[in-house]
C-alpha cells in the first residue's frame, strides 16, 4: 500500500486547526503558511 500526500494541503489543515485553537496567533500562522507554500512552489518539494 502506497500513501502519497501533497505537502500544501497538509499545511493548510494544520494551519486551520492551529487558528481554531489559538485565534490570537492568526497573523503568525498566516505568515508562516505563506512562506512555506511559497518555498514549496519555488523548490517543488513534495512528500
Image (cartoon, helix red, strand yellow):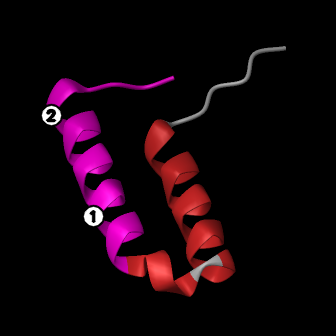
Residue 22 coordinates in the image, percent (x, y): 60, 78
| Of the pair 29 and 4, the residue shown nearer to us | 29
Q: Which mark is residue 42?
A: 2
Residue at the image position 65 percent from the left and 69 percent from the top:
17
The magenta segment is 27-47
Measuring 60% from the left and 33% from the top, which residue is drawn there? 5
Q: Is residue 6 above or below residue 14?
A: above
Judge from the rendering whether residue 19 lies leftward or rightward of residue 29; answer left or right: right
CB under 8 Å between callouts 1 and 2? no
Q: Secondary structure at mark 1?
A: helix
What x and y, as percent, mark residue 36? 31, 45
Tell me which corner region of the image, top left, top right, bottom left or bottom right, holds residue 42: top left
Q: Residue 31: x and y, percent?
A: 27, 64
Instruction: Look at the image and say whether residue 44 sits in the magenta stretch.
Output: yes
Under circle 2, the secondary element is helix
As drawn, the label of residue 31 is: 1
Task: Reply yes or no: does residue 21 show up in magenta.
Answer: no
Amino acid at each position: 500500500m502506497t500513501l502519497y500526500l501533497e505537502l500544501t494541503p497538509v499545511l493548510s489543515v494544520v494551519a486551520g486547526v492551529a487558528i481554531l485553537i489559538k485565534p490570537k496567533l492568526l497573523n503568525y500562522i498566516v505568515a508562516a503558511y505563506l512562506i512555506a507554500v511559497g518555498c514549496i512552489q519555488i523548490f517543488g518539494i513534495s512528500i
